[in-house]
Image: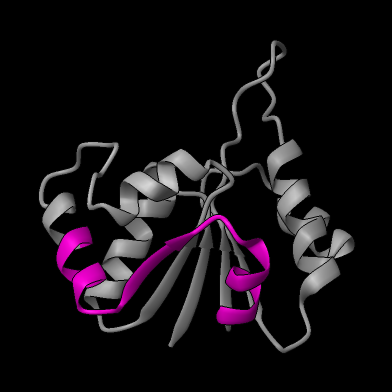
Amino acid sequence: MDISIFGTGYVGLVTGACFAESGNRVLCVDINQQKVDALLRGEVPIYEPGLSDMVIHNARDGRLDFTSDAGRGIDHGRVIFIAVATPPREDGSSDLNAVRAVARTIGSLLNHPAVIVNKSTVPVGTADIVREIV
């Protein structure tokens, strides 16, 4: 299966590596080009036991790739995960600006059937927001 994951933080990178380990073709998208370049060199910015080895061998074997090109990510994915940061605001609610931005990008570029998946750490109702935007 062709999977795209927007965001290469803890949720996105671990999810992408695990899907690739399961035999899927995964393209992780991040707006931070320096982070993408580091991942392409096999430098994993977070610690999770076994993650570095999983990222390196799946990238080497062609199942895991990284890009900052959102269009490439949308073209690739038949399942598209939105796993971008949702930091807390001062009032304790989640800042969904990055989720909304990815949803707008997907909505403007998607030209094939795809399932869009939110990461599990977003507030209830986020799927409705994403669906409306897309």
Q: How many marks?
A: 0
Q: Is 85 in the magenta?
A: no
Q: Residue 73: percent from the left, percent from the top? A: 58, 69
User: Considering the image in quadrants, where does the C terminus appear?
Assistant: bottom right
Q: Is 58 in the magenta?
A: yes
Residue sitting at x 25%, y 44%: 44
Residue sitting at x 37%, y 42%: 10
For this rendering, which residue is in front, 72 or 98? 72
The region drawn magenta spans: 55-77
For this rendering, which residue is in front, 69 or 44? 69
Q: Is residue 118 left or right of residue 52?
A: right
Q: Is residue 85 left or right of residue 9?
A: right
> Picture quarter containing residue 96?
top right
Q: In this rendering, does residue 125 appear at all?
A: no
Q: Residue 55: percent from the left, percent from the top? A: 22, 60
Residue sitting at x 16%, y 51%: 52
